[in-house]
Image (spheres, rainbow, N blue to C red):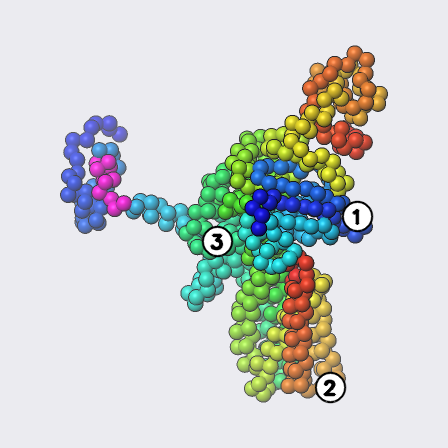
Amino acid sequence: MTTEAQYWHADPALLARYIAGALDAVTGASVEQHLSRCESCRRSVGPLLEPGLVDRTWAGIRDAVERPPLPHSLRLARRCGLPEPTAVLLAGAASLRSAWLVGAFLSLSFATLAAYVSGGTALAPFLLIAPLAPVLGVAAAYGPRQDPLEALVATAPYGRTRLILLRTLAVLVSVLPVTALLGLAVPGPPWLAAAWLGPALSLVPVLLALAGFVGPRAAATVVLLGWSSVVVASTRGGLDPAWPVEAGQQGVYLALAVAACAVIAIRLRIDRQRGVAL
Amino acid sequence: MNVTRNTVELTGVGKRYGRKHALVDVDLTFDQGVTGLLGPNGAGKTTLLRIVATSIAADTGEVRLLGRDPHRAYADVTAVRRELGYLPQELGYPSDMTAFGFVEYVAVLKEWNDRERRTQEVRRVLDLVDLSDQATVRVGRLSGGQRRRVGLAQALLADPLLVVLDEPTTGLDPAQRADLRRTLSTLGHRSTVLLSTHQTEDVAALCERVVVLAGGTVRFDGAVTDMVATAAGRVWLADEPGDDALVSWQTGTGRHHVVGGTPPAGADPAEPTLEDAYLLMLGPDARRLRAPA
């Protein structure tokens, strides 16, 4: 390595073209080489740069390095209009981890397959699992055990209730379309493909209301056992396989959902400790 | 609204867990400056801080934070929470979040919705706790002290008017304690800072005012120097342990540091420390604290 002084300097016009990116590859590389060794030319480059360019570039690099990337599903949701702060909150939610989604998808697929292969005589597995998939997802979205930041969430202006409802919504959005598609594969009358939605959408508020009293784990257990016994009892009782989701029963689910929503609303109103009612 | 109101006003506040009284009829007010809550385990420090942080409700008494009653309406508690920075005693850290990601998540919960401003704020607080270099490291890979500082960083977001720190010094080394002291004294000019600890050194180093809690009641409330003064004339250096001393222990010089009781023969009066005053204030309970490990 030599330490001799530089005998030539790049003229301002050349530097200006270098900054504008207007030089051919060879000349550009040569100027760059020179700049790396010539302090005097480096100093002349500074004033020629557009003000703020270096700061902007550096901020962009820092942003890309520091900010954790969003999962694919949330990037997709961002493109569909999901607000950026909401995406950050959902990215931090353990409930939306792919492991859980894959698990829900697999158990649903098996249940659908079982119903399909048996030609409609054994709808029970599908009817058992389809309404429970969102319920279990919501339970996972919920509890302090799943959320290590519980103490902070409860005292943040955003509010715990709002965060749980947001996650619940995200779980429903991610699970319901898949379940609906699989429902189409189930043999039986066309309305059956959507009929499981009734119990699914009523069990979620029932879970949320119960969880306010006994915690999410116990509430999920109660809901799970309750729904299983309805399905098993109807199968054992020699009723039509689609009995749990027939019109009459859908009315009961609707009533349950309304009652559960009322309980949630009343608790929100009377609980002294706002924001921790759910 | 009365503008001269204190930031935190607790009147006759009580809290029970089953049969155990965690706080009994506590009257305290806090305003700008750093106050240390000192007390043995189970004294009610965490319960008091959780009430001030709107994490739990008091069973009895009146709580007013920033001039509002947090139990009255949702709008009131939310207004308080917007001005609150809280470091809970036990904070779980999702191990797969980075330090930056963790603080950013809390920033969103605190309604920092503008991405650019949020990024700047997250960087500012990470810088305050000297973790800028570790911003991209996963929390699971940080040391205990670094994790505690990540927790501290989120409590400093948005320069809150009310800062509640439950044992912030756990896991910090002396240099980091000095940094914390600098940060808190700057913060104390504008904000009301409440912190709990069971280390008297922390209080001496970090706080202007000290509140001693024991058994859910306030034993002392005043300036740190006033608390030290309560032990004047009751601490000695002697060649013997002292028969009726509250506590005594042998120092490095071979003499005994005697707190309370009557001075043993040939005892020399010693300059009291905050710890001496604390031990005297706890009375017989102090023997347990000072028992040899």
Percent x, y of residue B27? 70, 43
Tell me the CA gap for discs 2 and 3.
Answer: 58 Å
**Badge 3 sits on which subunit?**
B
Which quadrant would residue A100 be assigned to in this image? bottom right
Percent x, y of residue A267? 67, 65
Residue type pointed to by label 2: Gly
Residue closest to the eye, A142 or B259: B259
Tell me the CA gap for discs 3 and 1.
Answer: 40 Å
Q: Secondary structure under badge 2?
A: loop
- List the single residue furthest toward the right: B243
- List the single residue furthest toward the front: B2
- Read off the residue under disc 2: A238
In the rendered view, would you say B281 is above or below A126?
Answer: above
- Residue B20's disc is 1
Tell if the residue under mark 2 belongs to the same chain as the one under mark 3: no
Which quadrant would residue B279 be assigned to in this image? top right
Tell if the residue under mark 2 belongs to the same chain as the one under mark 1: no
Residue A48, magenta (yes or no): yes
Magenta region, residue range: A41-51
Tell if the residue under mark 3 belongs to the same chain as the one under mark 1: yes
- Read off the residue under disc 3: B112
Residue B244, magenta (yes or no): no
Residue type pointed to by label 1: Lys
Residue closest to the eye, B131 or A275: A275
Query: Which-is-in-front pick, marks 2 and 1?
Result: 1
Residue closest to the eye, B117 or A135: B117
